[in-house]
Image: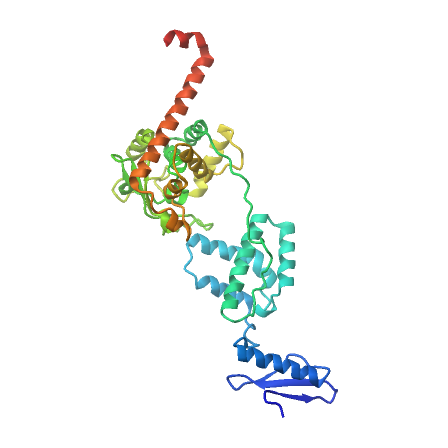
Amino acid sequence: MRRFGAVRQYRSGRWTASYLDQAGIRRRAPETFATKVEAEVWLSQVEADITRGDWRDPDAGAVNFEVYALKWVDERELSATTDELYRRLLRLHILPAFEAYDLDQITPPRVREWRAEKRAGTGATTVAKCYRLLKAIMETAADDELIRRNPCRIKGAGKESAAEREIATVEQVDALANAVGLRWRLMVYLGAYGPMRPEEQAELRRKDVDLDTMTIRVRQAAPELTTGRRAVGETKTEAGKRYVVLPAFLHKDLRRHLDWYAEKGAEGLLFVGEKGAPFRRSSFGRKWRRARTVVGMPGNFRFYDLRHTGHTLATRSGATLKDTMVRAGQSSEKAALIYQHSDLERQREVAGGLDQMVRAARKDAVDGADQGRGGAEVVRGA
């Protein structure tokens, strides 16, 4: 008589095996066996799993993927933009392939097939984002012991290889600021020399600006969702809450903007439209594209790329990587420890370096234009 489980033979000649689990529920093998030995070997494997603590309820993975994935998103404290992104990736790219399956039916071959199909008709960046999301969901399912192992096992599939972004010159930043119009020119400068994210600028208030010290305090962000709703809330990372010391050459632009365009009162928004409404990505986007065309910038130069320009110029002015990370409000779990020690005084030094660099570049541009109009006059004037 067997010590664990039982085997018996059907009239067809095939064998079945069953056992009592730890809750006293009778569990049967998911398939029949050709011989009694095969059935007993299966029972031995189950017994070994129980002894090692590796046994998993065979019905645990019978959870619909769509139900689990949407609950997974609901349970996370995501920013409004990340929540919107995850739901869009699920709706458009992941659920159409996996919504009919239970968790334990999503296998490595099915994941590979899905990814290959997506790569054939979807951008590489989107495919990488989708894969990372699917992998994260299935990793949680494995942690919940609903599946034995994550089926997303394609090395490097979640990595994005972004193209090298364009870096604007000081002259181009000035040209973009002029082309976008007086109401929005400060936004261009804060994007480049802040360097602030557009959603951070959208929630700046009068009380955040100190003209005497040339500092702006970033407290919150207001990204605009695809629905058009302004999602006022926390900055992208905890490091995004910061004081930004501006270069001195922006004093005139900052003062003029406060006098002419910012809402009145300490809580007044720094950037509002012609009719007094808060900054809208859609309406500003039209002005940005027009300015980009006027200046002759590449069509893929985004407003967000001004931050990359600011990083580069700050580094050239003498800032360390630590300084630029603090200045831009960038962080990760590692960077939170590495980049938190750049203090306000050091940020003033960085802003001073930027001030000198931009002033020199502007002077060179003016001198070059004067020489082009008549070198002889310049010599006599000198």
Does residue 96 appear to the left or right of 219 in the view shown?
right
Residue beneath the point at 49% across and 28% down: 294
Identify whether 299 is placed above or below 18: above
Identify whether 359 is placed above or below 1: above
Q: Quadrant of residue 179?
A: top left
The image position of residue 329, as x and y in percent, is 38, 45
User: How was the colour assigned to the protein in this rendering?
Assistant: rainbow
Does residue 303 appear to the left or right of 97 in the view shown?
left
Does residue 160 appear to the left or right of 209 in the view shown?
right
Is residue 243 shown to the viewer in this render?
A: yes
Question: For this rendering, which residue is in front, 118 or 246?
Answer: 246
Question: For this rendering, which residue is in front, 222 or 140?
Answer: 140
Question: For this rendering, which residue is in front, 72 or 144?
Answer: 144
| View extreme (right): residue | 12
Question: For this rendering, which residue is in front, 311 or 70?
Answer: 311
Badge count? 0
The image position of residue 116, as x and y in percent, is 65, 55
The image position of residue 107, as x and y in percent, is 62, 65
Is residue 232 shown to the viewer in this render?
A: no
For the N terminus, which image quadrant?
Answer: bottom right
The image position of residue 229, as x and y in percent, is 41, 50
Identify whether 185 is placed above or below 229: above
Residue beneath the point at 41% across and 54% down: 79
For the C terminus, which image quadrant?
Answer: top left
Identify whether 14 is placed above or below 229: below
